[in-house]
Amino acid sequence: MNEGKFKTYMYAAKTIGGDYAAGYQRGLRRHFHGEKFGTEAEHQQWLALDGHRQELGDGYRDGVEGGPPRGFHGNLGNLNAQGELPADSQMQIRLNSQVKARYVKKAQREGMKLSAWVLKTLDAACQDNDHENH
C-alpha cells in the first residue's frame, strides 16, 4: 500500500467516527507499518475483539486487511483528489422528522454519524452521475 492510499483510507475512516473507525485506523496503521506498529501480543488482542467490543474488532480486522473502511468503495478518488480540505462551508436543509429518523438509522447501521453518511451518499450520487454522463 502506498502512502497516498494509506492517507486516503485514514481520512475516510476519520469521517465515519465511532468504535469501528477507531479500530480501523489502528488496523490500517498495522497494515501500513507492519510489525513496527504495536507488538504481536497487542495485534492478537485486537484481532480477537468481539462481543461488546465487536465494532472495534471489526474495524481493526478490516484495517489490517488493507481494504477501504466499511461503507466506502475502494475507489476513493474524490477524497484523494481533494486532499484534506477544510470544512469551510455549511449546508442546511429542512426535512420531516420521520424522514430524518430513517436517515439516522441507516447511518447508524453503517456505523456512521449522520453528517458523514450524508456526505458519503451525496458523493456516491455524484460519482454515479459522472459515470452515466461519460
Image (tube, helix red, strand yellow):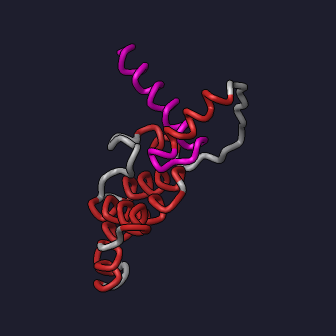
Residue 27: % across, % down: 36, 67
Residue 102 falls inside the magenta stretch: no
In the rendered image, the quadrant that contains the C terminus is top left
Height in image: 10 above or below 85? below
Give residue 35's position: percent from left, percent from top.
Answer: 29, 79
Q: Main secondary structure of the magenta part?
A: helix
Q: What residue lies at 31% left-to-right and 67% top-to-bottom?
A: 31
The quarter of the rendered structure image containing the N terminus is bottom left
User: Magenta stretch: residue 133 in it?
Assistant: yes
* Quarter occupied by residue 102: top right
Foreground residue, 121 or 110?
110
The x and y percentages for residue 9 are 41, 53
> What residue is shown at x 39% (from left), y 43% (from top)?
72
Decide if residue 24 is in sight here.
no
Taking the spot 47% from the left edge, 25% from the top edge, the residue there is 126
Q: Residue furthest top?
A: 133
The magenta stretch is 108-134
Give the quarter of the image for residue 49: bottom left
Looking at this view, is 99 or 87 the one in front? 99
Q: Determine which quarter of the picture holds residue 95.
A: top right
Asked if residue 24 is positioned above or below residue 42 in the image, the reply reads above
- Taking 44 as reference, is 81 above or below it? above
Question: Is any part of residue 36 visible from this angle?
Answer: yes
